[in-house]
Image (cartoon, rainbow, N blue to C red):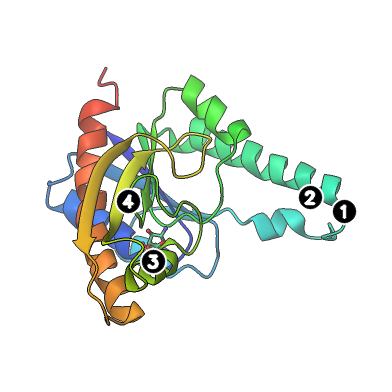
Amino acid sequence: PRILVLISGNGSNLQALIDRSADGIIPGQIVSVVSSSAKAYGLERAAEAKIPSRVHALKEYYTGVPKEDVSGRKAARAQFNRDLVSLIINEVKPDLIVCAGWMLILSEDFLEPLENASIPIINLHPSLPGAFEGINAIERSYEAGQNGTVAKGGCMIHKVIKEVDRGQPLVVREIDVVKGETLESWEQRIHALEHQAIVDGTVKALKELVRVD
Ligand code: GRF
């Protein structure tokens, strides 16, 4: 099966996917990497692994459209989504899309055509189901752990639906709060968990979500 990986940054989770598909743990091939940023180190990782990659940057679509021009930016965002959907459906033709640190919300006009094309999308999110959706989840869960609001943290792989970070979890990995721990240590423990969860989640998605014709 053909896997497309969407990234925006360092790509340490992409690296885990590359390594595990190379050694066969993931029964699929990463056929393309799309980054929302030209500066993403993950693009280097794709190049190293000889995986075709491309940049699909919202910034390019916003060129010449001032922030105040709300409808202009809405139109530009819609075009960004249309072009990305077209690239995916007509060129990449993946069986599964894995969001590994993709930092843009995937709205209905992106999700619907892919749903109609029967291409499932899964996402890695660094918090437990139902907690800390959206950005800065690691920092927010760290604060909550240190101030006693939560006793656990972790990450999950979930099916992408229009409600941000609220799709059915495929894999959940937990860690216990350690009082007095630094944010760096908390972050490091969560990232270590993610690199396992994203592999398990991709294997599970290939088994359960991808139609094998
Ligand atoms: C991870 O923490 C992921 O959960 C979040 O962004 C980070 C991506 O890290 N969405 P990397 O680019 O895979 O190293």
Coordinates of residue 118 in the picture (x, y in percent) = 42, 22
**Of marks 1 and 3, which one's residue comes earlier in the chain?**
1
Q: Where's the C terminus, which quadrant?
A: top left
- Ligand 1: which quarter? bottom left
Q: CA distance from mark 4 to mark 2?
A: 33 Å
Which residue is rendered at x = 72% and y = 53% of the image? 61
Which residue is rendered at x = 27% and y = 80% of the image? 181
Which residue is rendered at x = 31% and y = 59% of the image? 13
Q: Which mark is residue 128?
A: 4
Q: Which mark is residue 144?
A: 3
Coordinates of residue 165 in the picture (x, y in percent) = 44, 45
Q: CA distance from mark 4 to mark 1?
A: 37 Å
Instruction: Answer few, some or many: residues within 10 Å of disc 1's Cα (few below 14, many 20 plus, some between 14 and 19).
Output: few
The residue where tag 2 is placed is: 73
Q: CA distance from mark 1 to mark 2?
A: 6 Å
Residue 187 or residue 72, whichever sits in front: 187
Q: CA distance from mark 1 to mark 3?
A: 37 Å
